[in-house]
Image: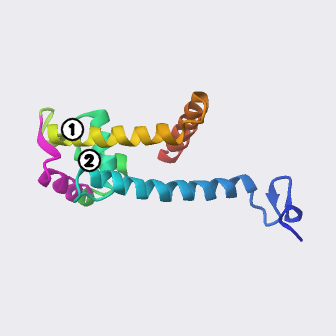
């Protein structure tokens, strides 16, 4: 019996939708490549950074000053992990903390000028790579992919 005989109407005889199996396979490849790429990109910002720091830099660039608790919630890590990551970024001179004027007990984290310059250079290179890799795609297809990924991310966030 070949694969086509096992699949009837898009549903495997085991009850698994083939579309979801294909989605899982493609997302696995995408995420594996994204992790490797993020590791490369973050090391270009600074060779001593952990790959997980790239998401923090993106968030700080896009949203400006943030409390550590907000960053932790957005990234999906605990307070201790966030503190350790921010301390490392601070020691490298990429972020700084300042008292939150709305709450003297809290601190706001922001990119330093050095952090901003390094991050923007690397982000520009990453975007140029996407442009090269998707050069034969229609702009509408790129927009649709971005829209669908946004919808997926929104759904995952809850």
| Residue wearing tag 2 | 69
How crowded pointer 1 is (Cα within 10 Å; few <14, some 14-19, many 20+) is rated as: some
Residue visible at 50% across and 55% down? 31
Residue visible at 36% across and 46% down? 74
Residue 51 lies, in percent from the top left, at: 33, 57
Q: Quadrant of residue 98?
A: top left
- Specify whether 123 is left or right of 12: left
Q: Are marks 2 and 1 in contact (CB under 8 Å)?
A: no
Residue 96 lies, in percent from the top left, at: 13, 44
Q: Bounds of the magenta span?
A: 82-100
Q: Secondary structure at mark 1?
A: helix
**Mark number for residue 45?**
none
The disc, 2 or 1, on the residue closer to the chain's N-terminal end is: 2
| Residue wearing tag 1 | 117
Does residue 20 belong to the magenta stretch? no
In the depicted structure, whether residue 18 falls above or below residue 145: below
Residue visible at 74% across and 60% down? 16
Q: Secondary structure at mark 2?
A: helix
The number of numbered discs placed on residues in the rendered structure image is 2
- Specify whether 110 is left or right of 120: left
5 or 134: nearer the viewer: 134
Rounded to the nearest angstrom, the CA distance separating label 2 from label 1 is: 25 Å
Q: Which quarter of the rendered picture does the N terminus lie within?
A: bottom right
- Specify whether 99 is left or right of 77: left
- Report the mark closest to the observer, 2 or 1: 1
* Coloring basis for residues: rainbow
Residue visible at 35% across and 55% down? 40
Of all residues shown, which one is farthest toward the top? 140
Q: Quadrant of residue 110?
A: top left
Residue 27 lies, in percent from the top left, at: 57, 54
97 or 5: nearer the viewer: 5
């Amino acid at each position: 019996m070949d694969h086509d005989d096992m699949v009837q109407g898009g549903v495997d005889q085991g009850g698994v939708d083939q579309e979801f199996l294909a989605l899982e396979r493609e997302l696995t490849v995408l995420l594996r490549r994204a992790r490797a790429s993020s590791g490369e990109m973050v090391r270009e910002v600074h060779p001593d950074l952990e790959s997980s720091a790239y998401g923090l830099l993106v968030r700080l660039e896009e949203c400006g000053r943030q409390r550590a608790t907000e960053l932790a919630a957005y990234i999906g890590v605990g307070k201790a992990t966030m503190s350790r990551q921010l301390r490392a970024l601070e020691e490298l001179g990429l972020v700084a903390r300042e008292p939150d004027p709305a709450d003297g007990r809290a601190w706001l984290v922001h990119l330093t000028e050095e952090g901003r310059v390094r991050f923007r250079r690397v982000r520009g290179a990453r975007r140029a790579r996407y442009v090269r890799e998707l050069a034969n795609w229609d702009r509408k297809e790129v927009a649709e992919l971005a829209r669908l990924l946004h919808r997926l991310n929104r759904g995952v966030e809850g």
